Image: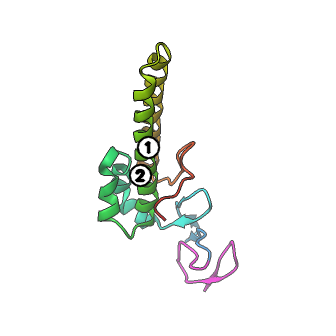
Amino acid sequence: MAVCSKCGAQIPDNSSVCPTCGAPQQVNGANQQQSYVNGGNYMDPNDVQQNKVMAVLAYIGILFLVPLLAAPNSQYARFHTNQGLVLFLFDIAVGIVSAIVAFIPFVGLILSPLLGLAMFVLMILGIVNAATGNAKELPLIGKIRIIK
């Protein structure tokens, strides 16, 4: 039996993740690539590979429902589904604010496109993170948890 490099617990030989703390382990001398949430919660690399498409779909508007329903047991898809849902709700709020501000001369002409651009940038950031196997929170809104 091997010993976890982080917590010292015994782990099965050739295990890539500690069953006690979730820390990545070296297998056959090579560090296995791990994806993780910023809090240090490690995710199974197989889960990440199998659910990348679901994670990408989570950032495309109402399509956050697809991974929510199709991959409910995937920690990776659930993380990105939460991020996509928060982005979707934030997009609705930005749309309402933009509609209200549009009636204010000059301010509406500047603020509405900037808010739309910010939403687009957040969506692209989320898609890139999901497609590359990263579980990084989105700037500004990523700390909000709706789906646990």
- Find residue 107 and report its horizontal and vertical position in percent: 50, 17
| Residue at x 69% of width, y 76% of height | 7
Report helix, strand or loop for mark 1.
helix
- Identify which amino acid the numbered label 2 is placed on: Leu
**Residue 104 higher or lower than 146, as above or below:** above
13 magenta-colored: yes
Q: Position of residue 5 (x, y in %)?
A: 68, 73
**Does label 1 or label 2 sit earlier along the sequence?**
2
What residue lies at 36% left-to-right and 68% top-to-bottom?
Answer: 72
The rendered magenta stretch, by its main secondary structure, is classed as loop
Judging by the rendered image, the residue that carries numbered circle 2 is 85
The residue that disc 1 covers is 128
SS class of the residue under badge 2?
Answer: helix
Q: Which residue is depicted at the point 40% across and 45% down? A: 88
**For residue 6, what is the image quadrant?**
bottom right
Please state which of residues 145 and 18 is positioned toward the viewer in this rendering: 145
Q: Nearer the viewer, residue 34 or 36?
A: 36
Q: How many marks?
A: 2
Magenta-drawn segment = 1-20
Name the residue at 54% across, 46% down: 141
Q: Residues within 10 Å of mark 2 (few under 14, many from 20)?
A: many
Identity, as a three-letter code, of the amino acid under mark 1: Val
In magenta segment, residue 117: no
* Residue 71 relative to residue 116: left or right: left
